[in-house]
Amino acid sequence: MASVNTNYSALVALQSLNATQKQLADVQNHINTGLKVSSAKDNGAVFAIAEGQRARVSSLGAVQDGIDRATSTIDVALSAGQAIGDILKQLKSQAVAAEATDLNQDQRDALQANFAALRSQIDQIANAATFNGANLVNGSNLTGTANAFSVLTSDTTTAVPYTLSGGALT
């Protein structure tokens, strides 16, 4: 009776089957991960480079998230600035109207009350212009750490603490 171990043709067929199974497993791994080199055993040098690139992409994603948050904060501040600018135009017209010599005291009092209400709106807008805890219009809650990431030189991240108080960056 012949066994696989003694039958040369069967042994060659078994080796071929095992090689095909290994290649199939490798292809399935590539398909599952979506990566041509998914582990160090595929190609160690390329895998090491790819891992470094993945780390850079991840870091840049975090930087992009920070930029998006900063952009949103600035957008809120710009919108508040536009609204305050519109109110300032109204205040200017109120001041010009108050210069009229033919106004009686009741009219002047009404203009003064309207002027005070508009000034109050400016304060409300300035205090409400907050995004992610930061208010660039009134300067509250502006402390933190900005992370700078250097891709071209050394792939390092540097933390830069900052405080913005009364319009002065320290």
Image (spheres, rainbow, N blue to C red):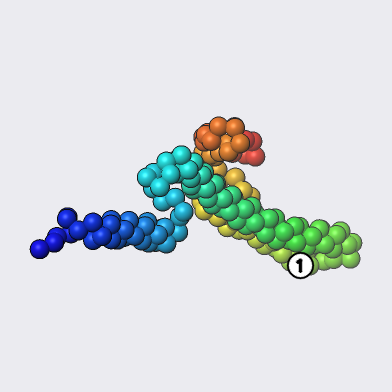
Residue at x 46% of width, y 39% of height: 45
Judging by the rendered image, the residue that carries numbered circle 1 is 106
Quadrant of the image containing the C terminus: top right
Local crowd size for mark 1, using a 10 Å CA cut-off: few (<14), some (14–19), many (≥20): few
Task: Tell me what residue is drawn at x 75 percent, y 61 percent.
Answer: 86
- Residue drawn 89% across and 66% down? 102
**Residue 44's image quarter?**
top left
Camera-nearest residue between 82 and 119: 82
The reply to whether residue 55 is in sight is no
Question: Residue pushed farthest right?
Answer: 101
Residue found 48% across the figure and 43% down from its top: 46
Q: Secondary structure at mark 1?
A: helix
Instruction: State the count of labels.
Output: 1
Task: Residue 37 in the image: state x and y as whole percent.
Answer: 44, 50
Residue 4 point in image, percent of width and height = 18, 59
Depth check: 128 or 49 in front?
49
